[in-house]
Image (spheres, rainbow, N blue to C red):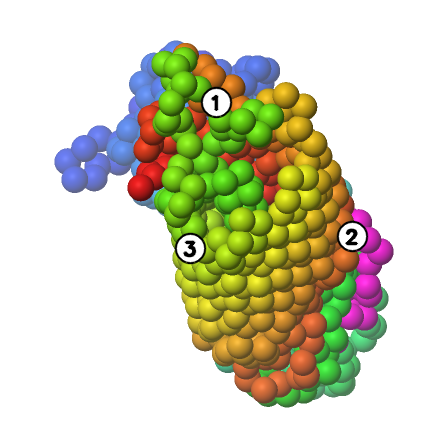
Amino acid sequence: MTLPTRRIRPLVASIALLLAGGPFAAEAGNIQAEQVWVNTSTTGTGLSWFTTGNWMNSTVPTSASLTSVINGGTAQVDTKNGVSQTLTIDNGSIVEVIGGHSLTVSGGITINTGTLQLGSSGSTGTLVGSVNLTQGSSALVLENSGAYGGTISGSGNIYKDGPGNFALTGANIGSYFGFVYVQQGALTLTGSVGGNVIVGEIPPPLSGLTKGGPPPILSGNGTVGGNLTNGGVVNPGPGTMHVGFNYTQEAAGVLQIGIGGYGPNQFGQLFVQGAATLNGTVKFVDLGNFTPSGGSTFVFLTAKNQVQESTGGITGVFTTVVDPSPLLAGKLVYLANSVELVISQRPILPVVGGPAAPGPSGVRGLTPNQTAVAIDLDGALTDPRLDKVFAALDHLPLSEIPGALDLIAPAELSAIYEIGIGTANVQAFNLTHHLEDLQAGATGFNASHFNLDTSKDGKSTAGPDGKSGKDVYTPSPDNPWSVFLSGSGEFLDIAGDYNARGYDITTGGFTLGVDYRVTPNFALGLLTGYAGTGANLAGSGHIFVDSGKFGLYGTWFNEHCYVNGLVSGGYNSYDIRRGSLGGMAYGSTEGGELNALITAGYNWTQGPVKFGPFAEFQYTYVSYDGYQEHGSLTPLDILGNNSDSLRTRLGGKVSTTMKVGGFRVSPELRVSWQHEFGDTTRPTDSQLASGAGDVFRVEGPYVGRDSIIVNAVIAVALSERWSTYLGYDGQLARRSYQSNTVSGGVLWKF
């Protein structure tokens, strides 16, 4: 029906309507009454639809009402859901459906010279019913997020304003011929509109709409019946977006094509029935986990009038092409009626960079390890065995590619060498303390550090009761045999650097030795031992090592001088789990080690105190057999590798023996400077297990060559046969390297 547009008083209007036979109708036994909005206020935030005083007869419309908002006011459906049989908006009036509420109009809405707004900047609104935009001054504003699937007719305008994504799902070709302005946020078109669509910051004919923010977006696989002008972002698909007439892309416009597969409905396509005039940017993006492979072709834009082909065609070109991935190059092929994308694989090094200088490197520079991996992959760029590897790299943004190359590089296997060198150091420390016990005259059984120096100026001390006689702390001088047992735990931290990730190592084990005093100043012995080690690697990786040790040692000494020696070997089994590209890489192998130690020193005695300098030379060689990893996208053939360490120590020591209560206590402190002459980065050679590429070498984190070694021991004799001790060995002040070892135990003499 046609509603009055003049302002009338409620009572007079009611009488006039009654006398004229008025707008009353019978439906399902109910009398339908027209409700007219009489409040003319246009200031503030509007007036509630549910306030009775805003209506002509002080009655809020119901589903049986014929409703008119004609007086230039703003009616807000804001506190609950509104209903009406029909609704007419006229005379510049505005109806807002906000607060997450809905308006249901079963007989449809007619907008003459007014606005219907669904949602606000902070809320949503829902409409059930058709909309007739009768003229150019009629407006439907889609604010924020939501969806509308009803029928739209007429020649008025539709505006997408505010943030969020609003979906139009209804079929409106043949009924709607107005303009759709996508000003802000996103409009998803899965249905159709018969008019023209304009995307972007084009001055709207409707005042009060929001401007600014990210470029507005039109997306979906629906149909634009008229022309499509793109000054923002048009994102067709998945599938095809159709344009009934012409497509024009402005300099600021972006045509975004999502690629999720090779099928016709798996990548975005724009089909134009008229001409396509191109400018601006075309941007290709991955959908889901799909990344196109080199050599793939996608026809993403077609401009062809299927009835009269001469009216279609492509003019202009895209001035900017954004590739689907940093490692995938997109070449555009312009044909008379279409534009194709042809994908080619780029090599890694030209894209990401080259070797970086020591220190933190940016995205544009690769570390030496990353460079080694990149060179190997680039050398096999066309090898089909690397298709899955490049597909994974192609899916990454530029900033994440260096990290992916780090995952392929097995630099953390340098921990194998540090484990062997660390356990060799601990073994040497424990043996050194036992040989000092031998040099002090120990026999019987002792657990390293247990024998106490009980001499004073070469004479025997008195017993604990202060009387002369047998010294309960002095072992039998007639027993040439000595047995020692030491237990220890080492905690080693290797910090990562710009080139390789670090790791933590924890080792627990024991050393058992037996020796024979050949002469009063010379002894030889055999030792064996076990160590269990766990290394925590980056990315939840680990290395578990079981080590068996065996060796030969000896000492020569006199009143002031001493020389100690050790030659030992070991067998190691390794269980390895390494974080790699696309998952964990698993493997196991075996290896061996060789350790040699020579120590020479001199002692002075001043009362109960002994002190003097010492020098040590130690060599350790660690090797392991080659093995093949399984798991991940890039399992490797790890070649047999080895590394050695040659280190010297120069320092001094001081010890004493004192009586505390009924016990005799013997503390000792050794401090030395250590210098490493051998490898400091521990290289690893490997090749992709697939056979693609060549052997490449990576290195572990760099560790310093110089450090301070601190060894402190305190032993307490509890009785003639029982003693206890606690020891600490630390390697400190070394770059990226810190080792702390704690040892302890008890002594029983027989």
Identify residue for label 2: 361
Above or below, 733 against 592 in this view is above
Give x and y (percent) for residue 439.
55, 43
Is residue 590 visible to us here?
Answer: yes
Asked whether residue 352 is drawn in magenta, I would say yes
Q: Residue furthest front?
A: 469
**Residue 122 vs residue 676, the one in the foreground:** 676
Image-quadrant location for residue 203: top right
**Magenta-highlighted residues:** 346-364
**Residue 623 vs residue 737, the one in the foreground:** 623
Q: Helix, strand, or loop for circle 3?
A: strand
Image quadrant for the C terminus?
top left
> Which mark is in front, 3 or 2?
3
Above or below, 84 against 240 in this view is above
Q: Helix, strand, or loop for circle 2?
A: loop
Give x and y (percent) for residue 382.
67, 87
Identify residue for label 3: 514
Give x and y (percent) for residue 352.
77, 64
Alpha carbon distance from label 3 to label 1: 28 Å
> In the drawing, what numbered circle is on residue 555?
none
The first of marks 3 and 2 along the sequence is 2
Alpha carbon distance from label 2 to label 1: 66 Å
Identify residue for label 1: 461
Amino acid under disc 2: Ser
The first of marks 2 and 1 along the sequence is 2
Give x and y (percent) for residue 53.
39, 12
Which residue is found at the position 42% from the left and 55% from the top? 514
